[in-house]
Image (tube, rainbow, N blue to C red):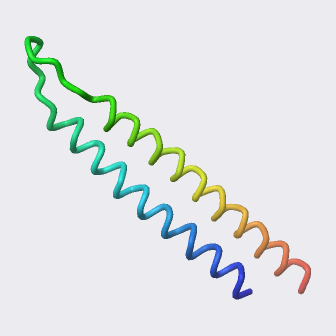
Amino acid sequence: MDKINGVTATALGGIQSSLKRLDAAAQKIAAAPARRAEPTELVDPLVDALVAQRTLEASAAVVRRADEMLDALLSALR
């Protein structure tokens, strides 16, 4: 049970850090100048946003799997 809790806590920490990273990337994108005469470098924040999204998805999958394992454990104990 402690291992499931540890995995879940780690996954939730991953979700939290991914959300912070996604928020920072979104702020950089939103703050970029929108003038056509001045090129804006958005590659880095867009890549950061995609990486944060994938990390968030992976962490959410870990939480789902831990939930499934806990459900299977509880079902076996019934």
Q: Say whether residue 47 is left or right of residue 34.
A: right
Towards the viewer: 19 or 42: 42
Towards the viewer: 37 or 66: 37
On the image, the x and y values in percent for residue 24 come to: 27, 50
Image mark count: 0
On the image, the x and y values in percent for residue 49 come to: 39, 41
What residue is shown at x 72% (from left), y 63% (from top)? 65
On the image, the x and y values in percent for residue 25 come to: 30, 44
Give the farthest residue toward the top.
37
What residue is shown at x 11% (from left), y 28% (from top)? 33
Q: Picture quarter containing residue 60?
A: bottom right
What residue is shown at x 42% (from left), y 64% (from top)? 16
Q: Is residue 42 above or below residue 8?
A: above
Q: Picture quarter containing residue 70?
A: bottom right
What residue is shown at x 67% (from left), y 61% (from top)? 64
Q: Is residue 65 above or below residue 7?
A: above
Q: Quadrant of the C terminus?
A: bottom right
Q: Is residue 36 above or below residue 2?
A: above
Q: Quadrant of the N terminus?
A: bottom right
Q: Say whether residue 30 is left or right of residue 72.
A: left
On the image, the x and y values in percent for residue 57 come to: 56, 50
Q: Say whether residue 39 is left or right of residue 78.
A: left
